[in-house]
Amino acid sequence: MPSLTALDHLVLTVADIPATIAFYRDALGMEAEPFTPADGTTRWALKFGAQKINLHQSGHEFEPKAGRVQPGSADLCFLTDTPLDHWQTHLAALQIAIENGPIARTGATGPITSIYIRDPDHNLIEIAEPA
């Protein structure tokens, strides 16, 4: 059987690309990067580490796309090596409410401790520190 090796990117459909970029840049430290696909248009991605999140403007998604695209339908977990109390202080300074946590969870490779916030589209964002 063939096997997969990594997740290259995922796509978020969002209501407001500039607001999304500002949130993920300021709150989570991601870099916004324009890119030009084969059709010659300019699109936006958020980059962190070796990961990338492509952004689609709601109502103007690129083909092919998921079957039921809509802002606010994602639930994403990001790993951090920064202690969660530092995240709590950082998010409080930005007036971003922590919806839940710190709370023990199980991640892809084992135990994690997580806090949960919402992005501008109300996607659930989990920031997790491996145990």
Image (cartoon, helix red, strand yellow):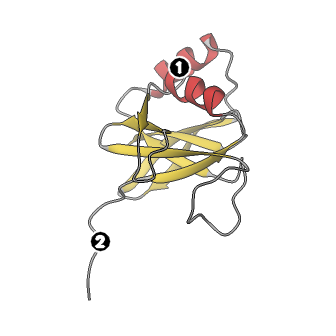
Report the number of numbered marks: 2
Depth check: give the residue in front, 21 or 129: 21
Left or right: 3 as drawn, with respect to 82: left
Residue 108: percent from the left, percent from the top?
40, 59
Amino acid type indicated by mark 2: Leu
| Disc 2 element | loop
Residue in view at x 57 percent, y 62 percent: 63
Residue in view at x 41 percent, y 42 percent: 36
Q: CA distance from mark 1 to mark 2?
A: 32 Å
> What residue is disc 1 on?
26
Q: Classify 65 as above or below 122.
A: below
Residue ranking furthest to the top:
93
Q: In the drawing, what numbered circle is on residue 108?
A: none
Depth check: give the residue in front, 127 or 112: 127
Q: Classify 91 as above or below 9.
A: above
Left or right: 79 as drawn, with respect to 1: right
| Disc 1 element | helix
| N-terminal-most mark, 1 or 2 | 2
Figure quadrant of the C terminus? top left
> What residue is disc 2 on?
4
Q: Classify 104 as above or below 100.
A: below
Residue in view at x 73 percent, y 50 percent: 59
Depth check: give the residue in front, 101 or 36: 36
Depth check: give the residue in front, 102 or 22: 22
Amino acid type indicated by mark 1: Asp
Q: Quadrant of residue 82?
A: top left
Figure quadrant of the N terminus? bottom left
